[in-house]
Image (tube, rainbow, N blue to C red):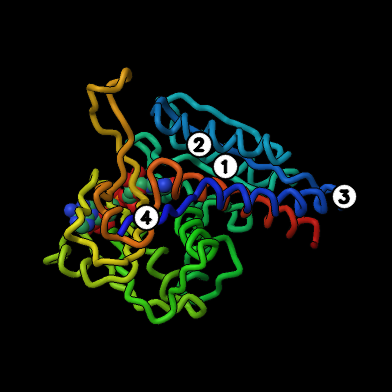
């Protein structure tokens, strides 16, 4: 079996096409969607992600405000920036790029973002709604992007055995909630670093979502013939055959394509979907402001 490609890039394009119309309606109602992206420090990967987000705004005609602060910025100053952005009525979405420098309490800072502007979907109020099974709020972008991509590919989840590798606040935990929610109806197992015999648990799954940050750890013997595999991982690994000396690798070994029915590529899988969902959350927040 050679796995079909779960093409996140193509799915993200279809999301963007739909958003164009919704953005025109917002603008006609006098509200131009506006996203603020705050980045603190010099982490090169974070700067690449922020650039992709700003570029997506440009493609769609969403206004973006990009705020860059030096590594040595104090937590108080970041707090003041978030408060100012919360008060700004022309702004609909606020994103604080993760990771923040080590001297800052990232969770406490992102908790300050007004829930209605929390386009990353990490505020306790938004995550709390998800726990309650209310899926109409701001959903975290990466797991909701995975769900959208599976739906777009026509992959049925109801009654399927799903394994989520990872239990982070950003990906694994909300992913498990979304897969098990009413409407998706998968039966979900969460695997983490203390799980015994993760490989055999995974090998029984119809659907595997890998979000552990361990390059190519999920090998071909982890995956049942015909399973659906979504690779969330983005890892930099050394590669002397490349001019730049590194390449991007997922959490799933490429040989899994021999066993799986579907496999998402890295790059070009979940990454573009995360950005598309961020754009959708921003447009949803603007629609809310415009009473649409
Ligand atoms: P975290 O480091 O926050 O969480 C990793 C999770 O994986 C933890 O729950 C950890 O378990 C678990 N884990 C680690 N090692 C193992 C192991 N050997 N066996 C089983 N479980 C393990 O990472 P994130 O959730 O933020 O990100 C995961 C990956 O997804 C990363 O590669 C990241 O770059 C990528 N990512 C990609 C995005 C995209 O847009 N495509 C967006 C966000 C992230 P424990 O809780 O026990 O420590």
- Measured in 3D between alpha carbons, the distance from the residue under mark 3 to the one under mark 2, in whole angstroms, is 34 Å
Front label number (4 vs 1): 4
Mark 2, residue position: 78
- Measured in 3D between alpha carbons, the distance from the residue under mark 2 to the one under mark 1, in whole angstroms, is 6 Å
Mark 3, residue position: 28
Q: Check disc 3: other Cα within 10 Å, few if <14, some if 14-19, many if 20+.
A: few
Reply above or below: 53 against 22.
above
For this orientation, the residue located farthest to the top is: 243
Mark 4, residue position: 263
- Contact? badges 3 and 1 (CB < 8 Å): no
Front label number (3 vs 1): 3
- What residue is rendered at 41% in x and 25% in y? 42
Q: Check disc 2: other Cα within 10 Å, few if <14, some if 14-19, many if 20+.
A: some
Q: Earlier in the sequence, mark 2 or mark 4?
A: 2
- What residue is rendered at 30% in x and 34% in y? 236
Return the x and y of residue 217 as percentages of the image width and height. 20, 50
Residue 82: image tag? 1
Q: Earlier in the sequence, mark 3 or mark 4?
A: 3
- What residue is rendered at 80% in x and 56% in y? 290
**For residue 135, side relative to residue 124 (left or right):** right
Front label number (3 vs 2): 3
């Amino acid at each position: 079996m050679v796995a079909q490609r779960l093409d996140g890039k193509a799915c993200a394009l279809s999301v963007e096409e739909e958003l164009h119309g919704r953005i025109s309606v917002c603008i006609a109602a006098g509200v131009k969607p506006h996203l603020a992206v705050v980045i603190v420090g010099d982490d090169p990967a974070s700067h690449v992600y922020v650039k992709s987000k700003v570029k997506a705004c440009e493609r769609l005609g969403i206004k973006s405000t990009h705020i860059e602060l030096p590594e040595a910025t104090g937590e108080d100053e970041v707090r003041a920036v978030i408060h100012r952005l919360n008060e700004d009525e022309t702004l609909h979405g606020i994103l604080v790029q993760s990771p923040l420098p080590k001297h800052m309490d990232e969770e406490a800072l992102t908790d300050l973002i007004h829930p209605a502007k929390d386009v990353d979907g990490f505020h306790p109020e938004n995550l709390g709604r998800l726990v309650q099974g209310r899926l109409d709020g701001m959903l975290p972008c990466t797991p909701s992007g995975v769900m959208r991509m599976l739906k777009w590919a026509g992959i049925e989840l109801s009654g399927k055995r799903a394994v989520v590798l990872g239990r982070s606040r950003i990906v694994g935990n909300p992913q498990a909630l979304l897969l098990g929610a009413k409407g998706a109806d998968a039966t979900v197992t969460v695997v983490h670093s203390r799980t015994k015999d993760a490989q055999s648990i995974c090998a029984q799954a119809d659907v595997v979502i890998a979000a552990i940050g361990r390059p190519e750890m999920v090998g071909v013997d982890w995956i049942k013939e015909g399973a659906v595999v979504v690779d969330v991982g983005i890892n930099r690994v050394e590669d002397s055959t490349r001019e730049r000396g590194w390449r991007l690798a997922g959490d799933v070994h490429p040989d899994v394509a021999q066993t799986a029915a579907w496999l998402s590529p890295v790059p070009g899988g979940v990454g573009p979907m995360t950005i598309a969902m961020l754009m959708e959350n921003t447009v949803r927040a603007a629609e809310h402001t415009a009473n649409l």
